[in-house]
Amino acid sequence: TKKEETTLEPSVVLQAPLTVTEVKVNVSMSEAAKKAAATGADGVGLLRTEHMMLTTGVHPKKYIQEGNEAELVKVLVENVLKVADAFYPKTVWYRTLDAPTDEFQSLDGGEDEPYEHNPMLGWRGIRRELDEPEILLAEFKAIKKLHEQGYTNIGIMLPLLQHPDELKQAKEIARKAGLKPQKNIEFGMMVETPAAALTIEDFIAEGIDFVSFGTNDLTQYTLAIDRNNENVADLYTESHPAVLKLIERVIIECNKAGVKTSICGQAGSIPAIVEKLVELGITSVSANTDAVAAVRETVARVEQKLLLKAARKLMQE
Ligand code: PEP
Ligand code: MG
């Protein structure tokens, strides 16, 4: 059962400068949750499930193939619980499995992962999960269990969407697990494809509570630059006007609809980009543990600047 209070030291909480824009933290390993929480972050903006699964050494599909869904649910519950507990009552956005074939090959049960020429453009993220719905269902069942234990601070975030139909199908699977998307659990999506950014209105119409920019992927897909290819690494930049334009239109549309916006890609640690995002009215910025303090400083500075600008303008009127 869940703990009554936060595990944070009061001094850590007080040291964090106050910002209206929330500053959250990205978590990959459940063992790192306590350290991440000690930054005073306002929640987890990205919990990378695939990293937790990689450390178990077992491919999630192995449990399903062996008819052992219960064990997979148990492993997920154990891992996510550590994070949800370290941050309770702050929100933890659990990202459903984003498993690229090349990374999951080495796992026990991963021997038959298909070989792909372009794994980054291949069978990963939500498209893969909808092809292997038993794994997605097990993930949702784990979250449902945690909810029943009082960990209602967990939200769900879907990776790599390119069409609202994927959102619709994922919600149906969540309902099968007993969850009520957008009713008793926050349900959101990553914006990682230009397709999602350009048609965000359609995803909003389908129903989402929040979006989070996965700028690592959004950049590679917008610029056609494989994020893992050293030959083109010098051309890779999140500051490209095309990437920023996509982000801007999504924030504008989401603000109109009352949908929260966040960023969990590396671009959230680039001061010039943070400045622009805060100016546009992003709800939160999520950074790696070691970058949380610096991002908080940047956000605070930008907010002060904006406030002073607005105040001066008011006084002139
Ligand atoms: C991203 O694409 O920016 C992101 C946060 O997801 P990942 O790096 O895990 O693909
Ligand atoms: Mg990504």
Image: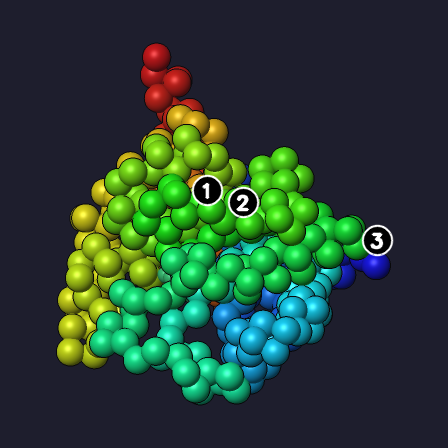
Residue identified by numbered label 1: 168
Quarter location, residue 224: bottom left
Residue identified by numbered label 2: 172
Quarter location, residue 215: bottom left
- Point out the quarter of the image occupied by ligand 1: bottom left
Marks 3 and 2, the one that precedes in the sequence:
3
Marks 3 and 1, the one that precedes in the sequence:
3
Which one is closest to the eye, mark 3 or mark 2? 2
Write the residue at 33% across / 62% down.
216
Mark 1: few/some/many CA within 10 Å (<14, 14-19, 20+) = some
Q: Amino acid at mark 2?
A: Glu
**Extreme residue toward the top, this view:** 317
Write the residue at 35% across / 21% down.
313
Q: Secondary structure at mark 3?
A: loop
The N terminus lies in quadrant: bottom right
Residue 276 x, y percent position in the rendering: 32, 43
Residue 317 x, y percent position in the rendering: 34, 12
Q: Is residue 121 visible?
A: yes
Establish if 305 lies above or below 34. above
Write the residue at 62% across / 48% down.
176
Q: Amino acid at mark 1?
A: Lys
- In the displayed structure image, the side of residue 32 where residue 315 appears, left or right: left
- Asked if labels 2 and 1 touch by Cβ distance under 8 angstroms, the answer is yes
Residue identified by numbered label 3: 4
Q: Is residue 47 visible?
A: no
Mark 2: few/some/many CA within 10 Å (<14, 14-19, 20+) = some
Which one is closest to the eye, mark 3 or mark 1? 1
